[in-house]
Image: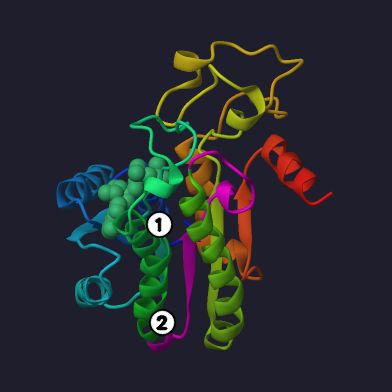
Amino acid sequence: MKLQDKVAVITGGGSGLGRQGAQLFASEGAKVAVVDIDGDRAEQTAKLVEQQGGTAIAITADVSDEAAVYRSVETTVEQFGKLDIMWANAGVVSRGGVPSVAGGEHVEFQDLTDADWQHVLGVNLSGVVYSCKAAVPAMRANGGGTILATSSAASFAAYHSIAMYSATKAGVNGLVRGLSLDLGRYGIRVNALAPTHGMSPNFLMGPGTPVIGQSYEETAGPWDPGVSPIPLKLQRPPSLVDNAKVALFLVSDDSAYISGLTLPATDGGTLSRVAMMFE
Ligand code: ADP
């Protein structure tokens, strides 16, 4: 068990990667506080963890509200006695540009409102800052801990229609780099995970390629392996389990010598595209 007796907060734990992470961390021995703006979904995650024999509580909180984040950490420490792991994972996607790969109503970038910007900035970047701030006192009291933030391949590479999102995720990368220097002396490591959510083929394959939220089979059909944008023999996009396992590595002692890193959990296709941008 890689997280025996550890206590973890996972924000955005009500769905997707956060929910998968809550289940994986609990199966490795962690007690998990599932924090989400959607309390019902947080409860559902906590139930799933309990059904598999783990321990979890659900906390309803908006991570863009600093006081709410502090209350979430207080509740966790009251309930479980300490805090070892903070995974600042809650996030929202922005729009604006060409019709979005994520679907939805088309909005030109200049027509996005300040409320749109404040929302994506508040959740994706301020939310991570607040989660780190709130975690540090509890972790210092406990002799150390690990902080993980969810970044994105879009923090390195260009994707249509999500420029605001990309900007906030690039901010996350800078935050973990800087914080790793400031918090290392307290035994606190700070890293980020940059998943691709199976998006990597979108900008390589053109129309008819997979979109977020749909399976590859639904949108693209089988690929010709000779031209596949995924160089891995697996020939599929990363699953939530794939990404959650990378998160587990970054919060466990297996990565005891890694801090300040944004680790892209992605195939060579995405990374080669990023490399091209710097050639
Ligand atoms: P992913 O597939 O990347 O995990 P999801 O949209 O499935 O993305 O999950 C993001 C989670 O973050 C959702 O459960 C959502 O309710 C949560 N979330 C979104 N905004 C906030 C917020 N302001 N505070 C807390 N949780 C949030």
Asked if residue 155 lies left or right of residue 18, the reply is right
- What amino acid type is highlighted by mark number 1? Asn
Where is residue 133 drawn, in percent x and y?
39, 79
Asked if residue 9 lies left or right of residue 177, the reply is left
* Residue drawn 53% across the image and 50% down it: 152
Mark 2: secondary structure? helix
Where is residue 43 drawn, in percent x and y?
17, 49
Picture colour scheme: rainbow
Q: Which residues are magenta?
A: 139-161
The residue sitting at the front extreme is: 110
Q: Which residue is at the front of the view, 38 or 143?
A: 38
Residue 73 magenta-highlighted: no
Q: Which residue is mark 1?
A: 89
Where is residue 41 drawn, in percent x and y?
20, 45
* Residue drawn 51% across the image and 44% down it: 243
Which badge, 1 or 2, comes first in the chain's sequence? 1
Q: Which residue is at the front of the view, 277 or 191?
A: 277
Q: Is residue 252 in view?
A: no
Counting every numbered tag in the picture gives 2
Residue 151 magenta-highlighted: yes
Q: CA distance from mark 1 to mark 2?
A: 17 Å
| Disc 1 residue lies near ligand 1 with CB under 8 A | yes
- What amino acid type is highlighted by mark number 2? Val
Q: Is residue 226 in view?
A: yes
Where is residue 116 drawn, in percent x and y?
33, 53
* Residue drawn 58% across the image and 88% down it: 185
* Residue drawn 43% across the image and 87% down it: 140
Q: Which residue is mark 2?
A: 136
